[in-house]
């Protein structure tokens, strides 16, 4: 009868203590070990025929396993939860499970999540936004399938589901200028290179305003990751604050465009609290067409990006990469899918008032 393999036997071959081997195999405090050590222990346990007390084999985790990590900034904005639900609808039909990790736009947190995904060699990673650190995401994609959802960018070497935010900004701008608006404001949270969708929406809007000889004023507020984490209503509150600032500093404004619908709700209440009417005095538009925007009390004009379908397509791209690795030992070539954005005109926008 062959001798039963023990933790001590594996530890001797791995050059570790039995306690360390036990922690790795039972996934306790595993983050103290590097990926090479973890994989070495799993490989030894599998090749030596080690069985735990429940008689489960400890085979090295392979990309064919079924856990998908979804990385997103936060879960408060229905923009992200709608995308995530689209991913999960498609994933569950194929027997995959998901784990959602939030970053609140903190780059250290994003880096940590990517390191963990690589260490545990999960089935794949889907970013519900464009990674703030594209190079790190690209490096991760050399080991695991990685897909991102967000602004169309030519420099991103990842499979993506794209949203053309420049075109979205143009569509809103054209809608408002055709209604006669000549004084338009754009309200946004942090505008920088890490938030390209916000920048591109503004650029698209600016492009149309210039062509129509309309003025565009931009109002922004810098939001740190710590502030976003500690203020669940950060987008609504920022929309309210910036709308008040706009109405005080640029009283000639006849239309306000917010970076997303959540800021739009804050702006909506600020306009009403100032005693103005929507859209008779001020037109209001957002982006994303999240569920509350269709409610009669809000009825927000916005841009629809087929968020649920974007989520489903992101999983499909990920599954194609997983299948390519399983059958050919390499990931599929980079694929981009783009959904056309469309205007959803509701009662929050109307003809410019005659002043």
Image (cartoon, rainbow, N blue to C red):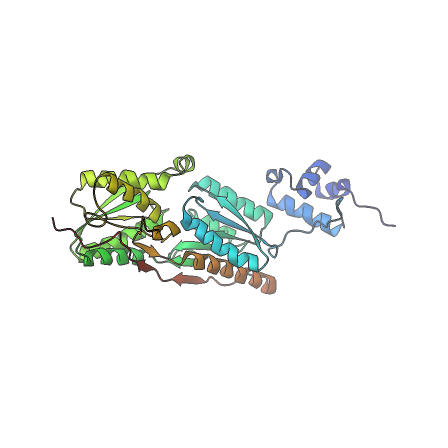
Q: Residue furthest right?
A: 1
Q: Is residue 99 left or right of residue 259?
A: right
Give the camera-side residue of 76 and 325: 76
The residue under the point 67% across, 39% down is 23
Give x and y (percent) for residue 60.
Answer: 66, 51
Q: How many marks?
A: 0
Provide residue 186's location: percent of width, then percent of height. Answer: 25, 47
Residue 38, x across and y down, in percent: 64, 45
At a point 43% along the width and 40% down the height, the residue shown is 106
In depth, the one of 326 and 78 nearer the eye is 78
Toward the bottom, the furthest residue is: 327
Q: In the visual, does 209 lie left or right of 99?
A: left
Name the residue at 55% across, 44% down.
116
Res. 272 visible in picture: yes
Q: Would you say residue 160 is visible in this rendering?
A: no
Q: Position of residue 149 (x, y in %)?
A: 43, 54
- Residue extending farthest left: 355
- Residue that sits furthest to the front in the current view: 296
In this rendering, position of residue 69 left or right of residue 73 = right
Residue, x 60% and y 42% (percent of image)? 34
């Amino acid at each position: 009868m062959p001798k039963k393999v023990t933790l001590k036997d594996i530890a001797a071959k791995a050059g570790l203590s039995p306690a360390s081997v036990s922690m790795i195999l039972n996934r306790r405090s595993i983050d103290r070990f590097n990926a090479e050590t973890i994989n070495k222990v799993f490989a030894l346990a599998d090749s030596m025929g080690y069985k735990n007390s429940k008689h489960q084999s400890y085979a090295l985790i392979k990309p064919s396993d079924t856990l998908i990590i979804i990385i997103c900034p936060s879960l408060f904005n229905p923009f992200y939860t709608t995308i995530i639900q689209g991913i999960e609808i498609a994933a569950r039909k194929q027997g995959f499970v998901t784990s959602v990790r939030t970053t609140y736009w903190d780059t250290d947190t994003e880096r940590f999540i990517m390191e963990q995904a690589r260490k545990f060699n999960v089935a794949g990673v889907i970013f519900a936004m464009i990674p703030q650190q594209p190079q790190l995401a690209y490096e991760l994609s050399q080991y695991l399938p990685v897909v991102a959802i967000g602004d169309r960018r030519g420099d991103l070497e990842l499979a993506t589901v794209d949203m053309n935010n420049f075109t979205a900004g143009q569509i809103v701008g054209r809608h408002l200028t055709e209604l006669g608006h000549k004084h338009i404001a754009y309200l946004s949270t942090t505008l920088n290179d890490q938030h390209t969708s916000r920048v591109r929406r503004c650029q698209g809007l600016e492009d149309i305003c210039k062509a129509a000889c309309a003025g565009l004023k931009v109002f922004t507020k810098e939001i740190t990751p710590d502030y976003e984490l500690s203020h669940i209503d950060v987008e609504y509150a920022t929309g309210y604050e910036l709308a008040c600032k706009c109405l005080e500093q640029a009283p000639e404004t006849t239309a306000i465009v917010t970076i997303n619908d959540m800021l739009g709700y804050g702006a909506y209440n600020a306009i009403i609290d100032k005693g103005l009417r929507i859209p008779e005095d001020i037109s209001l538009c957002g982006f994303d067409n999240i569920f509350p925007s269709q409610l009669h009390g809000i009825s927000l004009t916005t841009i629809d990006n087929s968020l649920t379908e974007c989520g489903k397509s992101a999983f499909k791209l990920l599954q194609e990469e997983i299948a390519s690795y399983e059958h050919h030992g390499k990931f599929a070539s980079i694929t981009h899918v783009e959904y056309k954005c469309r205007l959803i005109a509701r009662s929050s926008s109307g003809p410019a008032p005659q002043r």
